[in-house]
Image (cartoon, grey):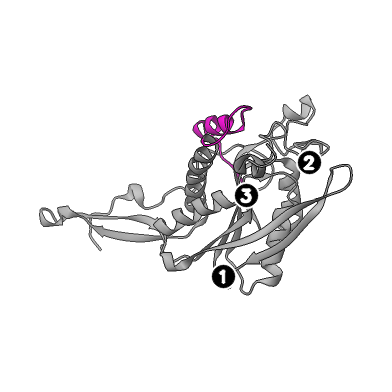
Amino acid sequence: MTDWVDSAYAQMPRISGELEHAYGDNVHILADTFLLTHLGFLCAKGTGQPAINHVVRDLYRYLIKAVLNGEFPRRVATITTRMIDHAPQGQWVGQVLDEQQRAITVNILRAGTLPSQVCYDFLNKTLTPSLVRQDHVVMARLTNEAGEVTGAHFGDSKIGGDIQDAIVLFPDPMGATGGSLSSAISYYKDQVEGTPKKFVCVNLIVTPEYIKRLHDDHPDAVVYAVRLDRGGSPADVLAEKPGVRWDEERGLTDKQYIIPGGGGFGEIMNNAYC
């Protein structure tokens, strides 16, 4: 290795710009005004196609970048630059992502289809493509006659192999009740061969109820989100740091839709029921 190693790149921080909260170390809510601006446009009444899908793509490119920086292993690389022909210092030494890490992104039909494809393409550009896979599963909310969510149904799936030593991603825009994601993680733990390094849920919006469900069912799962919505909480609870009065926080209507939220993204992204 070259003697000219710059200490500035010896230890790179993993995560920066996060919302302070009391939900635990596995929850990462990005404090990013740029992303909040674009998510606000995405959720605004009147925003339609084709703008919606363009914004979803952009948001997930930034989200998967945050996940790669925060959760994926690194290695020290020595890069011989074009300047090596002119000076012996023409080598850069520093931390980069370990391209040999296995990664699996799970397409949860239908709101997760576009986000998963974006993550899959981004992972293929960053890691060794032969170690990257995309799975496909069908999840549906179960509701009662009053329209209240009572559970989640795991339907058909196309799972392309084991998950041994992989980082398994669930890019699903809306983290509302947590029922679907909890069921999906349980299925991978119980029915798919191998032990992964970790499960990571990659969401645009999450609620306190969603975080609580995952915390209770799968305390090992990691959550990344652009925004926390707890609009159903009392004013004095909203004045507190998120998670301090977790049991009193509310981010769902009585029909389990996120507030302020952005409507049902599965419908909006596919022009269904419009």
Which circle's residue, 3 or 1, is located before the other in the chain? Answer: 1
- Left or right of 3? Residue 31 is right
Residue 256 image label: 2
Query: Residue 154's quadrant in the figure?
Result: bottom right
Provide the secondary structure element on which disc 3 rests.
loop
Work out how far the residue at label 3 is from the one at label 2, CA to CA, in angstroms. Answer: 16 Å
Residue 220 coordinates in the image, percent (x, y): 66, 58
Q: Is residue 40 above or below residue 113?
A: above
Residue 219 in view:
no
Q: Residue at x 41, y 65 (%)?
A: 128
What are the residue bounds of the magenta stretch?
27-50
Provide the secondary structure element on which disc 2 rests.
loop
Query: Residue 40's quadrant in the figure?
Result: top right
| Residue on which disc 1 sits | 160
In front of the other: 154 or 48: 48
Which circle's residue, 3 or 2, is located before the other in the chain? Answer: 3
- Left or right of 170? Residue 259 is right
Dot 2: within a 10 Å radius of its alpha carbon, few (fewer than 14), some, or many (20 or more) residues?
some
In front of the other: 173 or 86: 173
Residue 137 coordinates in the image, percent (x, y): 65, 61
- Left or right of 164? Residue 143 is right
